Image: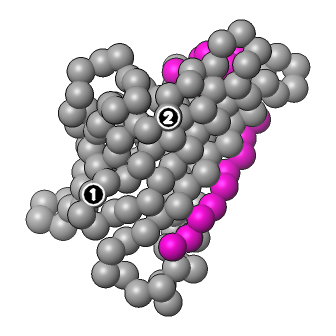
């Protein structure tokens, strides 16, 4: 069960960095071959659920997530969101933290523990490298696009 952490510093105010990272449908454009379906009415709050379906045709995986902690940033106070993965195959959690960075920008910390049911632990290293690359690219794309 690999756990990894990504950090980015961006020239965005806290609330804008938060908005870009926590508008769940935007993740579909940042992760290739992925569609997002929000299961609960907005706005996002603790208990909100959504599904990221990745793959093509019959070769798809659903990453079912529930927001279990929702503290948007206020003023100069950092924001923190925790997502618990509740799918049948993809398990674990993710945390997105946005805190003040240098020169009025933001420091983003994305932590994730990822488990794939039925995947032997011998593949943890490969899963971590692939996940770090995929989520790093996703974070970069989300933070670049308004």
Task: Give the colouring mode of the picture.
Answer: one colour
**Figure check: 45 above or below 124:** above
Query: Which percent across, then down, holds residue 94?
Result: 51, 49
Task: Indicate the secondary structure of the residue bearing disc 1.
Answer: loop
Q: Which sits in the foreground, 130 or 73?
A: 73
Q: Residue at x 18, y 67 (%)?
A: 59
How packed is label 2: few (under 14 Cα within 10 Å), some, or many (20 or more)? some
Q: Which sits in the foreground, 89 or 136?
A: 89
Which residue is labeled 2 in the image? 69
Q: CA–CA distance between discs 2 and 1?
A: 18 Å
Q: Residue furthest left?
A: 58
Which residue is labeled 1 in the image? 87
**Figure check: 1 above or below 64:** below
**Figure check: 63 above or below 18:** below
**Which callout, 2 or 1, points at the residue further toward the start of the chain?**
2
Foreground: disc 2 or disc 1: 2
- In screen coordinates, is 9 left or right of 124? right
| Quadrant hosting residue 2 | bottom right
**Figure check: 111 above or below 48:** below
Query: Which percent across, then down, holds residue 50?
Result: 29, 38
Task: Indicate the secondary structure of the residue bearing disc 2.
Answer: strand
How packed is label 1: few (under 14 Cα within 10 Å), some, or many (20 or more)? some
| Quadrant hosting residue 78 | top right
Range of magenta residues:
1-19
Count of numbered circles in the view:
2
- In screen coordinates, is 62 left or right of 29? left
Residue 17 magenta:
yes
Q: Residue at x 24, y 63 (%)?
A: 88
């Amino acid at each position: 069960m690999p756990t990894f952490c990504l950090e980015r510093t961006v020239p965005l105010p806290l609330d804008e960095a938060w908005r870009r990272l926590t508008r769940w449908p935007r993740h579909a454009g940042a992760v290739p071959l992925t569609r997002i379906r929000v299961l609960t009415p907005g706005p996002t709050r603790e208990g909100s659920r959504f599904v990221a379906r990745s793959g093509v045709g019959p070769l798809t995986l659903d990453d079912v997530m529930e927001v279990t902690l929702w503290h948007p940033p206020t003023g100069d106070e950092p924001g923190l969101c925790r997502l618990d993965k509740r799918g049948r195959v993809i398990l674990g959690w993710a945390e997105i933290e946005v805190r003040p960075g240098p020169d009025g920008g933001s420091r983003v910390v994305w932590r994730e523990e990822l488990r794939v049911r039925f995947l032997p632990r011998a593949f943890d290293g490969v899963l971590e490298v692939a996940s770090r690359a995929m989520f790093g690219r996703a974070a970069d794309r989300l933070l670049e696009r308004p």
